[in-house]
Image (cartoon, grey):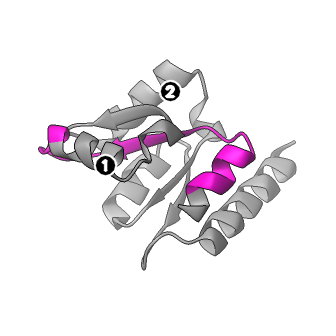
Amino acid sequence: MEVLQTLKRDNIQIAAASRTGEVTGANQLLDLFKVDAYFCQKEIYPGSKVTHFARIKQGTGFQYSEMIFFDDEHRNIVDVGKLGVHCIHVANGMTLKLLMDGLEKYARSQNTQS
């Protein structure tokens, strides 16, 4: 919850992208754990993460290069990375340290492109 609270405090918009056939159950869990309100957009359904991100891009107006993606599946990191999204592999669960390191790495990459 600390990660979500930090993002909200810093006015960083987040979206959920989940490839699951249990759409209703996934949404119920987000509600049950009281995290649903943290997401500006949710793309929760079977299919490709590329499709999820295309819809997030369309719904938010953010370009792929303005997005950061944290995921525990390497294949998703590869697929979404090809779009130009800054991807970070989460091998052992999301932590505040991983979030902060990812945001700092993203900021450095943006500064070198300017």
Q: Is residue 55 above or below residue 35?
A: above
Q: Position of residue 19 (x, y in %)?
A: 24, 46
Q: Quadrant of the C terminus?
A: top right
Tag 2: amino acid: Lys
Q: Which residue is mark 2?
A: 57
Q: Where residue 47 appears, x then y in whole percent?
A: 20, 39
Instruction: Count the marks.
Output: 2
- Tell me the crowding category of disc 2: few under 14, some 14 to 19, or many 20 or more residues within 10 angstroms, Cα based: some
**Horizontal and vertical percent for residue 84?**
56, 43
Which segment did they paint magenta? 4-24
Question: For the point 16% across and 38% down, which residue is it?
Answer: 24
Q: Nearer the viewer, mark 1 or mark 2?
A: 1
The answer to which of marks 1 and 2 sits earlier in the sequence is 1
Determine whether, in the image, residue 68 is placed left or right of residue 92.
Answer: right
Left or right relative to 20: residue 17: right
Q: Is residue 90 visible?
A: yes
93 shown above or below 16: below
CA–CA distance between discs 1 and 2? 27 Å
**Quarter of image, res 46:** top left
Residue found farthest to the bottom = 92
Q: Locate residue 60, reporting x and y percent.
A: 55, 23
- Asked if the residues shown at circle 1 and circle 2 are in contact, with their CB atoms under 8 angstroms apart, the answer is no
Tell me: 100 left or right of 16.
right
Q: Which residue is mark 1?
A: 32
In the displayed structure, would residue 18 be above or below residue 51?
A: below
As for residue 8 lying within the magenta part, the answer is: yes
Identified by mark 1, the residue type is: Leu
| Kind of element beneath mark 1 | helix
Q: Magenta segment: does it hold 81?
A: no
Q: Residue at image x 65%, y 74%?
A: 97
Nearest the viewer among 47 and 96 is 96
Inspect this view and state whether residue 46 appears.
no
